[in-house]
Image: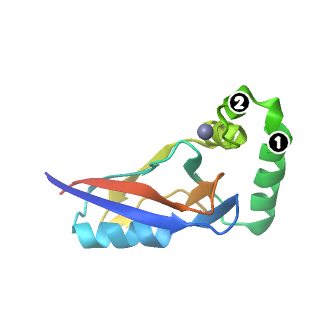
Amino acid sequence: MKSFRKELWFNIPTRRGFINITPQVEAAITESGIREGLCLANAMHISASVFINDDERGLHVDFEKWLEGLAPHEPVKQYRHNDTGEDNADAHLKRTIMGREVVVAITESKLDFGPWEQIFYGEFDGKRKKRVLVKIIGE
Ligand code: ZN
């Protein structure tokens, strides 16, 4: 069995945003040379997510609105976590509901997706460099 590890770095210029990272994950699979196996992708930060969904702009606006309804950024004083001097309690909550990682099967060197599935990085406390771990095992 082979194993391959790669970090993907992102610097989202806004506090929140979603980006389709499927091309970078596919490139990692090509680089790994693994044809049959499993691919894990996880956010390495507790204020960011990796998740699978549709690459449809309206849906991304819906996610943003839904998450702000569940855990609004303002007022920051409403959160006990922010008593520490941080302002990102909402980002921790958003990360929890959107998930830490995805695992996708690799079949014949390709991500074995269902219809319309794409991998996204979800940023909830951006404007700084953050990373996603890609780990691929197989042969
Ligand atoms: Zn925090």
Label 2 beta carbon within 8 A of ligand 1: no
Residue at the location (29% across, 55% down)? 136
The quadrant where residue 58 appears: bottom right
Residue 96 in percent (x, y) is at 61, 36
Using the rendered image of the protein, determine whether residue 118 is visible from the camera's viewpoint. Answer: no
Q: Earlier in the sequence, mark 2 or mark 1?
A: 1
Tag 2–tag 1 contact (CB < 8 Å): no
Residue nearer the viewer, 75 or 7: 75
Q: Quadrant of the C terminus?
A: bottom left
Inspect the image, locate mark 2, and give the three-letter code of the amino acid beneath it: Asp
Helix, strand, or loop for circle 2?
helix
In the figure, is residue 73 to the left or right of 122?
Answer: right
**Who's the residue at 67% across and 38% down the image?**
85
The answer to whether the beta carbon of the residue marked 1 is less than 8 Å from any atom of ligand 1 is: no
Considering depth in this image, is 86 or 111 the residue closer to the camera? Answer: 86
Expressed as whole percent of the image width and height from the top left, the position of residue 56 reads: 72, 66
What's under tag 1, amino acid-wise? Pro
Q: Residues within 10 Å of mark 2 (few under 14, many from 20)?
A: few
Mark 1, Cα crowd under 10 Å, few <14 / some 14-19 / many 20+, is some
Find residue 98 and report its image quarter. Answer: top right
Q: Position of residue 65 (x, y in %)?
A: 84, 51
Secondary structure found at label 1? loop
The residue carrying mark 1 is 72
Residue at 70% in and 34% down: 82
Instruction: Give how far across and how far down residue 71 sits, in percent.
Output: 78, 38
Question: In this view, which residue lies farthest toward the left?
Answer: 1
Specify whether residue 108 is in view. yes
- Residue with the mark numbered 2: 83
